[in-house]
Image (cartoon, rainbow, N blue to C red):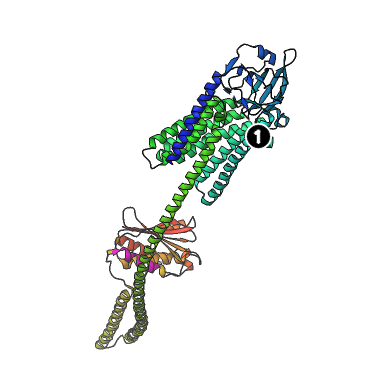
Amino acid sequence: MKRLARCLWRCGCLAVLGLLFSAAAAAAAAGVLRLNPLASVDSHGQLSMLRDPEGRLSADEAAAAPGWKALPGAVNAGFTRDAVWIKLEVQRPADAPQQRWLAQFRNALLDDVRLYRQDDTGRWQLAVHSGEDIGREHWPVDARNVQLPLTLESTEPTPLLLRLQSRNAMSTTIGFAAPEVYAGTARREYLFYGLGFGFGLMLLAFHTLFWQMTRERLSAWYLVYVANALLVEFLTAGLPQQLLAIPARLSDMLLSLSICAGVAIGIRFAGMQLGTDVRWPRFTRVVVRTVGLVSAIAVALVLAGANGLAMQAVQGTAMLCIVYLIGAALWLLPRDQGQARAFLIIFGIYYAGVMVSFLRNQGWLPAGAWTDNATAIGTLLHLLLMSMRLNRRYDQLRREKEAAQARLVHVVGRQNDRLEAEVRRRTADLRGEIEQRQRLEVDLRAALETERRAKQSQVDFVAMVSHEFRTPLAIIHTTAQQIAKNLDAAREKTLARCLNLRAAAQRMTALVDEYLTSDRMEAGQTPFQPRPCERDELMELFEDLVADWPDGRVVWHDGQLPPQLVCDPGLLRVALRNLLANADRHTPAGRAIVLDVVPAEAGGLDIRVSNPGDAIPHDEVPRLFEKYFRGRQAARSPGAGLGLYLVHQIAELHRGHARLDSAGQDGQVRFSLALP
């Protein structure tokens, strides 16, 4: 890379010296332009120029007008709408057999070119007319740029008068050559352009395929960058105009629009290459948007027909961008790892060519072979080096990707080993949990069997109590009849009969007390005994309640259970069961009951039970929590009117409250139980 940089620096120095030498030589030359039948001859130093701002002068008026100035080099008037008149004298050698010559113009974008010669009376007459405005199909010579045929019968000096106009930069070298010499030069020129554009199209095709494979943002921008650069050079060279017969105004507009877009695309792509979009993202966005705004204004000027003004604005902006990017690269040169150095080499070549073309278009450098083709040469070298840079970068990324994949395979292997060990441990834990569940299942079956026996014992006990009740009742009934029939019986007999009544009554009382005590113990009706309940115990309580109903009948939304709640779990279970049972009685088959459990704002728990059903009448709402109250809708279902009463009583025991949140006017009946 360093050798390439030194070589390019030497070539640039030689080019500048060549330009200076050519300018000095042209300034020193003077007189009649002598033609050479074996080579093309440039007219440097033999030209005089006159500007015609209005473009209304005739050839005779222009020839006689004051203000002619000698040109030290080629014609270089910059962007101007003026008609430019050129005066010179040519002479063919006496020993040259050729009488036909060609006046050659290096600029392919001249819109109007006219050649005048004097007649026998000394008046100037139009000899040849060419240029983009008349259409290439009417050109006297089918060529990439303007070629005017010239016949020189005499070997004496022949004065010529040329009139030039262009919507683009008025910069051209005027030369003269024999048709045979021009044919050889044209072949070499077309070969050069063919190789250059063939190489550009190959780059375009290669990077199109590369972008299709990678879909990387940088590749997409480079693809647009290359396509626009090739389009600009292609139109500047005049090849599409010659091959496709594109009208001048259309080709000039396409070229100007491509240049406007190229400045915006170039600053964006160059910033990505230099890394300014990563180092200074905000400032880079401001620069890119500003350049985009200038390009948009230039596009509007081009569409309005102000080509020269638009190009001056765009080229001035491009020069400022080049200064900014070169300055940024020089500042980053000692601070990065070669990115700025590569930028200076790769983009410096292109910027040098753009700078030379800009100075030539402004009239500050003479037109010539080097200045005319500076942008094309710089673009070709720039694209070549840029492609090498991108290929090297992608190769480096590929190696880094392969290294990363190797590291990833290693990490995945280690992770798989850890996962296998974790699976083995979890499998052992699961096996232990299965065994524990099997033991719990055995215990549950034993508990169910115990419950079955208890229920059977209860049934037997009730049957026994019923049987035992009949005996004292029979005694009471019989004794009462005996007393009623024998009111005059002896006192001792009546007393004995009364004792029998008392004994039967005491027996019945004892039986009732024993039954109620046994029933409370079987139903778990113990006094209010609050205690701290952990989250797991609460979770189990709610899961057991939901499991008592068929799947899907009760939908439980667990917002977040508190870590601990002080309550009587037995009474809480009774209250929740009554709420769910009440909702179940009034919920149509196939619909779901929603149980929401959310933490209260001041701590505690807020339990909400919602069910779809008919609306509760307004007159029944105040009595819902009364003992034994049953509404009109409850008449269709069994019940004693104690469910909501028990919920209310249990809530008050916990210093909370039970309330009706929605009476069903919106299709949902919702009760809530709040526990502090």
Can the viewer see residue 547? yes
Q: Residues within 10 Å of mark 1 (few under 14, many from 20)?
A: few
Residue 168: % across, % down: 60, 27
Residue 161: % across, % down: 67, 18
* Residue 540 on the magenta span: yes
Vertical comparison of 50 with 653: above or below? above
The image quadrant of residue 404 is bottom left
Of 495 and 173, nearer the camera is: 173
- Is residue 585 found left or right of 675 in the rendered image? right
Element type at marker 1? helix
Residue 315: % across, % down: 53, 29
Q: Amino acid at mark 1?
A: Gly
Residue 570: % across, % down: 32, 68
Residue that lies at the very extreme toward the right in this rendered image: 120
* Residue 301 on the magenta span: no
Where the N terminus falls, by quadrant? top left
Residue plotted at (52% across, 49% down):
215
Of 562 and 22, nearer the camera is: 22
- Which residues lie in the magenta part? 533-545
Residue that lies at the very extreme toward the front in this rendered image: 95
Reading the image, the residue beneath label 1 is 184
Of 222 and 130, nearer the camera is: 130
Where the C terminus falls, by quadrant? bottom left
Q: Main secondary structure of the magenta part?
A: helix
The image quadrant of residue 284 is top left
Residue that lies at the very extreme toward the left in this rendered image: 492
Can the viewer see residue 290? no
Of 537 and 569, nearer the camera is: 537
- Give the total number of marks visible in the rendering: 1
Vertical comparison of 413 with 465: above or below? above
